Amino acid sequence: MPTSEKEGGTTGLRRTAEYQPPRSWRSWLIGRPLRTADAADQAIGKSIGLAVFASDALSSTAYATDEILFVLAAAGAVAFVYALPISLAIVALLAIVTLSYLQTIHAYPGGGGAYIVARDNLGEFPAQLAGAALLTDYILTVSVSVASGMAQLTSAYPSLFPYRVPVAVGMVLLMMVVNLRGVRESGAILAIPSYFFLAIMFLTVGSGLTQYLMGGLGVVENPPHLGKEPIMQSVTLFLVLHAFSNGTTALTGVEAISNGVTAFKEPRSRNAGITLIWMSAILGTLFLGITFLAGKIAAIPSEAETLISQLARTTYDGRGVLYLCTIAATTLILIMAANTAFAGFPRLSALLAADGFLPRPLTYRGSRLVYSRGIIALALIASILIVLFQASVNALIPLYAIGVFLSFTLAQAGMARRWKKVGRLAPGQEAQERGSTLRYEPRWALKMVINGFGAFCTAVVMLIFAVTKFHDGAWLVILLVPVLVAMFSAIHSHYRDLAAHLSLEQYGGPPRISRQRVILPLSGVHRGTLAALRYARTLSDDITAVHVSTDQAESERLRLKWESWGDGVRLVVLDSPYRLFLEPLLSYIQEITAQRQPNEIITIIVPQFVPRLWWHNLLHTQTAMLLRLMLLFKPGIVITDVPYQIE
Amino acid sequence: MPTSEKEGGTTGLRRTAEYQPPRSWRSWLIGRPLRTADAADQAIGKSIGLAVFASDALSSTAYATDEILFVLAAAGAVAFVYALPISLAIVALLAIVTLSYLQTIHAYPGGGGAYIVARDNLGEFPAQLAGAALLTDYILTVSVSVASGMAQLTSAYPSLFPYRVPVAVGMVLLMMVVNLRGVRESGAILAIPSYFFLAIMFLTVGSGLTQYLMGGLGVVENPPHLGKEPIMQSVTLFLVLHAFSNGTTALTGVEAISNGVTAFKEPRSRNAGITLIWMSAILGTLFLGITFLAGKIAAIPSEAETLISQLARTTYDGRGVLYLCTIAATTLILIMAANTAFAGFPRLSALLAADGFLPRPLTYRGSRLVYSRGIIALALIASILIVLFQASVNALIPLYAIGVFLSFTLAQAGMARRWKKVGRLAPGQEAQERGSTLRYEPRWALKMVINGFGAFCTAVVMLIFAVTKFHDGAWLVILLVPVLVAMFSAIHSHYRDLAAHLSLEQYGGPPRISRQRVILPLSGVHRGTLAALRYARTLSDDITAVHVSTDQAESERLRLKWESWGDGVRLVVLDSPYRLFLEPLLSYIQEITAQRQPNEIITIIVPQFVPRLWWHNLLHTQTAMLLRLMLLFKPGIVITDVPYQIE
């Protein structure tokens, strides 16, 4: 309806009628499309935010204490007394990391986390490193958590074991669809199991502590055996550090909120910050509570039974309903930890894509206002990993967590650098730097020390991780991160190159075209050819019809037919004694191009009949398509298909 | 070099410089390209013709007698006396079939066999039936012979068993390459094992007969046990017929020469005919000789040892060099039987394609003057069958031979019909019918009876085949042939439809184009866009630039940029609140098309930058390609990509 066009400037017209997409099967699967203007309605509050972004972090309480005790067991059960101090140290580290990310969230209300902080304060290379580390870890989070959920499920129902890979992939695809529906809806779906887990864990830990204070807490009945006979080594600093680094898996997922600030309702930073504090407080409390109670009930780390299970059956006096609820909630939260990655990966890849480090199409927000391509990419890559590693947690877990600590280190180092810059400002002064505002802060030195110390601690943890798990598979990540960084650079240089070549700065405009020369390849003289000839006539009077001859008699017939139908247009017959078609034509076009005038353009007009049914195309050599592919790279040549529809 | 163009008529120019293809890896693999004019040099004589077209037929002497005795064994060893009469009947049938095909070869010097005979004398449907039956059987010939060759090989070297599928596929691909080199070269390669087989078989059968006449022929020492304990049934007519039909597998491959007449040197029909007589004579002699001697040495049919093996170790007194040569030659000829299909399938599919029943590109002769696409198609389909059936002869063999007998029946019925037409001619009279000449022939009635009787016999054999092997897999072929016929019809109706729609008969010429309306979709204003705008300028003054807006601020920037660079061309901005790009553009184009004037054409000019490296395309949404796919089916619209090369 051109009547709905109105003037929008001297040369601009704006159409007021907006395009409404028709309903389709996609609406049924992921919900009706949302307008760009509806983005604000899709923002989430603190309670759903906790469910969306915290399940990864909170789920680590299900195994972090086990990881510490496994290492300490090398020095015998007597070494278990070190578990509580180590846990306190980890909670202190958690506090430092939380503090650092709180500052990040307030400094960067546009979201970002490690990648943005590193980019703005440390430079391009550390930023790429942080991006590569986080992307790797998000993918592994999905694979590891789904695989560990499957492991819980198959230990309860061993008959499912042969189907674990398809079931795991099915779960990933289900999670993909849920996330394609949008953060708000997926958050609402996920809130139930998350809060169920929190409630049951607080009940378990709470009643355990109450029984301890009342003096009624017993020890584990029939504790499992230690996995392997310990080689009674003494408690060394290395052993304690190793246990500490193993326990820091509790911190994985803490960075998720800082990457997802934009998903929150306004005031974004405040809401995201409060959610982060809540998450860290819950995580720290549960982790300490479990470690403390594990010591009191004399729990034994074992692959046969988790500490959570030992704790639950001690506090609930056997395997009753509450025990089963605890196990079910733990299984659920482990699987759902994958969802944190589904919230984080697409946002981070969109950020990287916007900066030109990943393909730009990743910045596109789909019909439900989520970065649908990133969600689909994550689901596909994680599924491939699950298939390759046959959904085995033991094979995947050594790859995990190095990336997180690399990103922690970079984020905190970036924040420390930032405080240093803040320290150079005069009181009350502000400075703009890239996307964020530097504001004077009296306690900048203290904050810088805290962040610097945090960076140092997380760097140490990362190094211990890399060394102790190198042979088990960590080498793969250590190899993958540089490969990703190299890919980012290659993509970035392409976009920069492209922008430079397309830029209008100091550009005088394209050369005037004063002459069109038209080449019309013919395989026969029919209605399609004549339609193409008619079209060619509107472009130029300088038309050459070209026929590649593989059969003398046939080309003679074509020549005679052209004499009566060809409208007097010059026909060139190229003999092809080796029955090739494309090659002689290309070499002829090459010759014509070589003698091209400066302001002349050569248009190849290819008659193309369009069959009624798609499979009919299989019955014809796709000459037009091949010709286009061959000529696309040659300057000064334009190809036009003139379609002729067979009705 | 336009100087080499010379006038070839009022509108025609012929270029004398011929296109010479450059050397490439393909020349190394399949030989240097051959000119169309070299075709005569590629024709083969009688001795190579025998090697190329007879290996399938001759190889059946290796198992035909076994097949008869296997059935007779159901009535005990006493029934083996029926083997010789049955073999005589089969040889009589062979003589009838040979006679029929001799007449075919002389009537159709252009080649053809069952398909051409049925097409010219029975009509389109029987022709399609014959074509489908033969194509199916050619494919099965490759799969079955390579699989049976592998079975011989793996019974000698059981350690090869796990690799039988890749080795078999490798053999098929090797045969493909050999055949792509051309009939002449592949014939020369194949002549050695074929003649080696003939020599050794005549030696074996000859020395056996000599020993028998001299009275020195013993019986088989340690004969193998009968495969399964016979359920002693009496010798019924059905049993004899069943044994007869089983033995007629000896006839598979006889039709190959009639399909390949054009591969022979001139005089083609005479050379092909003599080769056919030679082949049938050798086949009949060896088959009768083996059956006769098998009875004399009291050979036992068994899956553990073939009759050839029993015969060879009886005549050569144990497993010496000559025995091993016999086994090796048999194995080789079994594998090489596949080569007959490689000679027949591409020719037949080219014939079908020329008649519009298969995709036309199958008529294209590759650089070595063979129908390379047919060769490659056969290799691929046969390889897929080998993989699906895991190279198992037992699984494949029931599918085999029905097709051959269906085509025999149709060919002979067609010839009988032809004699009837000949009978209506006056003495000395000639009549042209389609491709062949009907010539008066005094003994037409006798010939008609012979062909009619042959058609009846082969039809009976086919029916017995279909009934006795239905459950074992023959149903698949009985299902496949109609599916193929349906496919032929669908393809044929497409080509007929296309020809009618493209025909210039009673065509007044395409509508004059008096007006061009140009639409220029823009995603940004850059050098590529401006090059496209410059090109659009040469087509029309009625240009509309269209921008789909998903971001208000960005489209405002674009509008301002267009004001300074857009050369005064009208810009329409389409709001897309759901962030879709293609759909709003298509709906706008749809609107414009709806109000198109009769002689107006709409050209969509799509600016397309061409990156330096192919993988860079992965970094961009391929809008131009999608747009083309969407608009190809809409009449009155032409799409032109204006490429802008990034150097």
Image (cartoon, coloured by chain):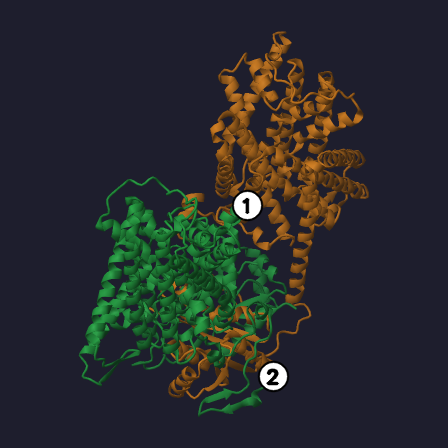
Chain colours: A orange, B green
Residue B252 x/y as whole percent: 36, 61
As drawn, B578 above or below A629? above
**Residue name at image x 47 percent, y 78 percent:** B39
Dividing the picture into quadrants, the one containing residue B76 is top left
Residue B472 x/y as whole percent: 33, 47
Dot 2 amino acid type: Gln
Residue projecting furthest to the top: A215
Q: Quadrant of the C terminus of chain A?
A: bottom left
Is A308 on the left or on the right of B292, as rendered? Answer: right
As drawn, A546 above or below A33? below
Separation (CA) of disc 2 from disc 1: 65 Å
As drawn, B317 above or below B283? above
- Judging depth in this view, the residue of A417 and A138 nearest the camera is A138
Dot 1 amino acid type: Ser
What chain does badge 2 belong to?
A: A
Badge 2 element: loop
Residue A595, numbered label: 2
Residue B159, numbered label: 1
Residue B407, numbered label: none
